[in-house]
Amino acid sequence: MTLDLRRYFSEFRNADPARIHLAAHSHHFWPDAACEGHRRSLADATRLADNKWEPIFATLIPRLQRGIAGLLALPDPATVAFAPNTHDFVRRLLSALPVPSRPRILTSDSEFRSFSRQIARLEEENLVAVERVLAEPFASFPQRFAAAAGRGEHDLVFVSQVFFNSGATSGPLDDIVAVVRNAQTLVVVDGYHGFMALPTDLKAIAGRVFYLAGGYKYAMAGEGVCFMHCPPGFAPRPRDTGWFAAFGALSSSSGAVGYGTDGSRFMGSTFDPSGLYRLAAVLDWMDEIGLTVEAIHAHVLALQELFLAEIARLGVQPLRDARLVTPVASGVARGHFLTFETAAAQAMHDRLARANIVTDVRGNRIRFGFGCYHTADEIAAAVGAIAGALD
């Protein structure tokens, strides 16, 4: 059974009623609650002026930490730190790696640019040594990645929960953590395409794994609000550090730069807090209507199945001729978008855009994303519009 949450997304939907938005994986619509949260941030800024930061740190951030901890089954909400983007966290993690030796990094060939571009640049200067495991074939990736991680030769193991360019997953996160033998290795999961899309339980590995994600996609809160769960004891003093990281610091008689022992050690500096308001509003709205990640995930998978069935029924040849990259076999985990590989991806994207059908293209791969603001009847109609635009 699918959901019908259209009434909760009226501001985004009514802004362009003719738009067919199939890019929830790229820029997810905000529910009306998030829009109201954004307005509340402005109201508080005007009302409190200089004093706005006190309730942000005393009330808003702890509320969000508890909400995120609940969604991920984290035992201690204080391990959650916030930043405007995940690249801030990537830099700080990299700055915590050992020197002067050349840090050894294990990752996949399908990481998002916030990480892949950064380590490629460091490679150019011979500052890091990177081992990349091919994401495809997806079925064997968990075993191949675990075999590489199990050799114990890395300072950093970094992998996506859901690969941004396919929708495939890296497999059970517990299995990755279990094979990392070196107790000093930083284990990091990029959960941007997993958080609030795939039900995620980090309870068993919360003491060992960093997990980073943000509000721009399935958390429905827009840009500027990202977070990272920081397991206690790992990377206690990142060299890339902002003054907010000193908030929980203990005084040191040695005069060394102090850090908090919780997630605050990865905090940066002054930021726009409006995203925090939006994310808090989303979590409150979900609690109010009883909406769960499990229900959203089941809804989206059903829409994907309908989308593929309609493509077959209507004979949308350009998509039938393309390679469906996303694994869709029964029982195989996948994210909330479908990826098709074709040399005509860009041309297809452009033709759809001219028909006000919003998709996303990455090289020779075109992606169609689905969210809780879509309904089954809209997906069927969308495929009909796609067929007409590509005819």
Image (cartoon, grey):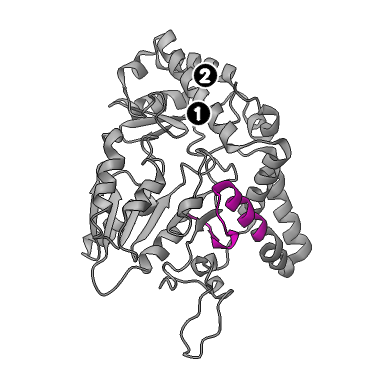
Q: Is residue 80 magenta?
A: yes
Q: Does 107 appear above or below 303?
A: below
Quadrant of res 332: top left
Q: Does residue 314 appear left or right of residue 363 in this picture?
A: right
* Marks 2/1: CA–CA distance: 9 Å
Picture residue at 53% right of the left edge, 57% below the top: 84
Residue 382's mark? 2
Question: What are the residue bounds of the magenta stretch?
Answer: 62-85
The percent coordinates of residue 232 (x first, y second) are 48, 66
Picture residue at 51% right of the left edge, 86% below the top: 252
Q: Which residue is mark 1?
A: 22
**Tags 2 and 1 touching, CB below 8 Å:** yes
Could you tell me the amino acid type at mark 1?
A: Leu
Q: Does 61 appear above or below 254?
A: above
Task: Depth check: give the residue in front, 238 or 139.
Answer: 139
Furthest-right residue in this view: 47
Is residue 21 visible to us here?
no
Residue 108's mark? none
The percent coordinates of residue 308 (x first, y second) are 43, 18
| Location of the C terminus (image quadrant) | top left
Q: Does residue 84 appear left or right of residue 137 in this picture?
A: right
The percent coordinates of residue 143 (x first, y second) are 28, 42
Numbered disc 1: secondary structure:
loop
Could you tell me the amino acid type at mark 2?
A: Ala
Numbered disc 2: secondary structure:
helix
Tally of numbered tags: 2
Q: Does 382 appear above or below 73?
A: above
